[in-house]
Amino acid sequence: MWRRVCKIVVYLLAILVGLAGIGTVYQWYGSVQDKKSYKPVGKLYEVAGSKMHLYTEGEGDTTIVFASGWGTVNPYADFSPLYEGLKSHAKIAVYDRFGYGYSDMTDRKRDIDTITNEIHELLLVSGQKPPYVFAAHSLGALEAIRYAQRFPEEVKGILLTEGGSPEYYKTSPELTFIPWIHSGLRTTGLLRALYHFNGFQEWVANQSNGDKLLTEERKELNRKATLLKVGNRNMRDEIRQSRENAETVLAGGKPLNIPLTVLTADYFGKLAEDRAWKDNEAALPSWSVSGKQIIVQDSSHYLHSYQPELVVDELLRLVDQ
């Protein structure tokens, strides 16, 4: 009996190894095809010896700089519901951190001062001019606040959409296993295969970023970016260093001498169920001498994809101040 069990286990392992090998080849071939049409929508600039992507449009004396949340594979597509309402009033600049969107991978550690140095250099070499209003989502709040600490003469305001506070990220649960799961699903081809099942892409959109507001072209960019980028080593290092990065921001001191607006999703009436996040959002305006919080109805974590008009209005208020 024991020998039979061992044989079955060996056969099952062999099957799994074979499937993983087939899936890896399938992912490799699919990635080669995707890269042929996954072309930058903006421009690539040399930053720290690698290429970093920046998308710009619009006009005005103030530039709104968009900082995406962790794991948002294509920031250009993610923030696109906001562009139409902003571009006639301000310039828009959407950057891809290394490992995201159309930017290269990097071997540099993803500590917050390295990241903000890269953002600063990108804005400089691409010809952007302050003053800037930072519009940051989720974990992007850390780099927006840190940028304002380090380059205060360049930043006139910050809008945080579902941004976490440094205090929250310093004590938040360890989530380092999540990017490894993402990476495993991508590299073995399982994630690519799931996109062939009816309803999977719609489920991903409903669970994450409200893709329903995106054009079909931008939905396709998100799909390709996910299959090419999700769970890569830069994303893994970002989440691994999130607590240390939060401590660095805390050491930088508060409050900032600029207005800060916090937009908090009501999670369709369920915000109160997550007491830690609710308390974090309520305390976040204390990071500014002129901070305020707005609870946004009928929205979830990717708030800008649910209530873009409200986000645009609040950004323009900061631009006009």
Image (cartoon, rainbow, N blue to C red):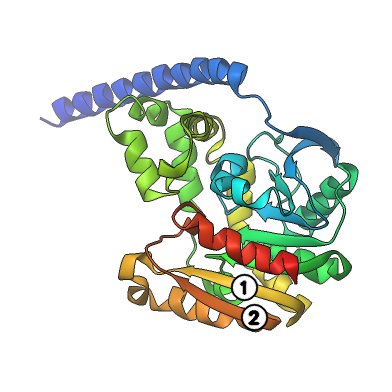
148 to 111, vertically: above or below: below
**Residue drawn at the location 74% of the way across and 62% of the way down:** 133
Identify which amino acid the numbered label 2 is placed on.
Gly
Dot 1: what SS? strand
129, 170: nearer the viewer: 129
Residue farthest left in this picture = 1
112, 301: nearer the viewer: 301
Drawn side of residue 140 relative to residue 120, left or right: left
Query: Residue 226: x and y, percent?
Result: 50, 35
Drawn side of residue 282 relative to residue 66, left or right: left
Drawn side of residue 297 relative to residue 90, left or right: left
Q: How far is the residue under mark 1 from the one under mark 2?
A: 6 Å
Please report contact status of discs 1 and 2: CB closer than 8 Å, yes or no. yes
What crowding class fits label 1: few (fewer than 14 Cα within 10 Å), some (14-19), or many (20 or more)? many
Dot 2: what SS? strand
Residue position marked by numbered label 2 in the rendering: 291
Query: Residue 195: x and y, percent?
Result: 36, 28
Residue position marked by numbered label 1 in the rendering: 261
**In which quadrant will I find the N terminus?**
top left
Location of residue 101 by image quarter: top right
Query: Residue 245: x and y, percent?
Result: 68, 65
**Residue drawn at the location 67% of the way across and 74% of the way down:** 260
257 to 50, vertically: above or below: below
Q: Earlier in the sequence, mark 1 or mark 2?
A: 1
What crowding class fits label 2: few (fewer than 14 Cα within 10 Å), some (14-19), or many (20 or more)? many
Query: Residue 264: x and y, percent?
Result: 49, 70
> In this view of the protein, can residue 45 be seen by the observer?
yes
